[in-house]
Amino acid sequence: MYLTGNEKPDFRTICNFKKECKELIEKAFKETVTIAKALRIPSLNHISTDGTKLKANASNNYTLSREEIEEIRRIIERGIAIDEEEDRLYGDKRGDKLPPELNTQEKLRKKIRELKQASGKRLKNAAKKSIEQHALGDERDKEKVKKKLDEAEEELNKSGQNAVSLTDPGAKFMENKKKRKELSYNSQITVDHDSGIILANDVTQNCTDHNELQPQVEMTEENLGSLPEGTEVSMDNGYFSGPNLRYLEEKGLDGYIADRKQAGEMKGNKPKISPFSKDSFDYDEEKDQFLCPNGGILSRKGEYEYKGKQVYAYYGAKCGECPFRAECAGECKIRTITSDGYEGERRRMAAKMRSEAGRKAYKKRKETVEWPFGNIKQNLKFREFLTRGTEKVRIEHNLVCAAHNLKIMWGKLAGKVGVLSKIDDFVANFVSAVTTSIFRFSFLLSRGVT
């Protein structure tokens, strides 16, 4: 702005640039990771992944349930039928030539109220606004209402939630740290411990983090080229699942993820420990058997499906002869243990997290990933999205993560004379070319060049 005489791009120009240059902005973030790696800023000894809820640009009050969407459609269809009857009686005329009982917006709104009363249901403001927009608008407005309802219904079918936002159907009700449910997106980042560089980022509609581990690892490898085998990876108990633990082992990554009970213990909670809980049964992975505290063997005897997942049942110990049967099996005649087929991975991770080295490595998680979120929210003032829709909020997220990385790299390079001479000529030329291109691009925008 100084070099251009305080001339700057109009906000619409910047907005259009963000919408039209999705791939360019995504590439720009990846280039920050590439340059940081070339400068040897991230050590990649320990990385951590976490998610946070960022508020969507949508009001909690402007939502509709499936029943409300269906009611809006019924009212609109009834209004269309009345309009067609009026066209038949009075002819298809302009609004100023309608019959006296319909020739003002007040009278039209009165008709809408009558239609709503006839439905016998109390409608939200979101529903009322949609009905009014359809009844009082032109053909373009009517198409907009129909499109919004179709998108909302489609999102309800995909998400399985009870309500959907008309403003941003992609946003989901998520509980934030203040225990308040807001329309939000789940922001995911993977961060290098020693430098704070964000190695990968994404925005998802998932309320939980269970399915985000594998995508984050794959994005990190794509941005870096590869991860060194044995890299420490820490995540909170939101990522704890059998498939995730097996995935880390198969990738050769040294994972540290606490289960729910261990996470509670680290926060000072003291869980009730039963001598006959599942954790008290030893597991023989080679034979796929559980050994009870009294020496009985429980083998896999059956399987069934529960909530779309395969569950295996283990039993077969001589519980009738056991003096602890009542305490162990309760009202059942025999003790049965269920497992999801990932018992070996779970036991190995639990043992690792009980060790002193495991707890020390896991503590790095907060040091790694919490402060980048703090920088983004507090220093960069990015607490909620300005745009709407999953694709657009991802563009915003890429921009803010790129800004975070640039700020870190600038801090690392400041005062280090000749640091660029230590890296390849290619990288030095690339940094110079990017800087020049950014300046030229900003200057052209300020002059109105598109």
Image: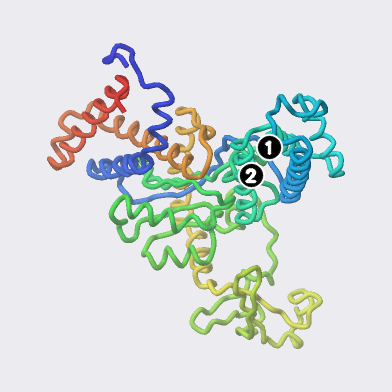
* On-image quarter of the C terminus: top left
The residue pinned by badge 1 equals: 134
Task: Give whichever of discs 1 and 2 has the lower sequence position.
Answer: 1
Circle on res. 195: none
Q: Decide if residue 190 is on the left or right side of residue 60.
A: left
- Report x, y in % for residue 377: 50, 32
- Report x, y in % for residue 268: 62, 48
The amino acid on which the numbered mark 2 sits, given as a three-letter code, is Lys
Can residue 174 be seen here? The reply is no
Residue 304 occupies which quadrant of the picture? bottom right
The amino acid on which the numbered mark 1 sits, given as a three-letter code, is His
Which sits in the foreground, 3 or 69?
A: 69
Q: CA distance from mark 1 to mark 2?
A: 8 Å
Q: Decide if residue 10 is on the left or right side of residue 146.
A: left
Q: Is residue 6 above or below residue 131?
A: above
- Report x, y in % for residue 262: 58, 56
Which sits in the foreground, 213 or 86?
A: 86
- Bin the neighbour count of mark 1 within 10 Å (Cα to Cα): few under 14, some 14-19, many 20 and up: many
- Bin the neighbour count of mark 2 within 10 Å (Cα to Cα): few under 14, some 14-19, many 20 and up: some
Can residue 44 be seen here? The reply is yes
Which sits in the foreground, 81 or 306?
A: 81
Q: Is residue 38 above or below residue 274?
A: above
Cβ atoms at labels 1 and 2 below 8 Å apart: yes
In percent of the image, x 83 and y 28: which residue is there? 101
Q: Is residue 277 above or below residue 122?
A: below
In percent of the image, x 12 and y 40: which residue is there? 425
The residue pinned by badge 2 equals: 146
- Report x, y in % for residue 99: 79, 29
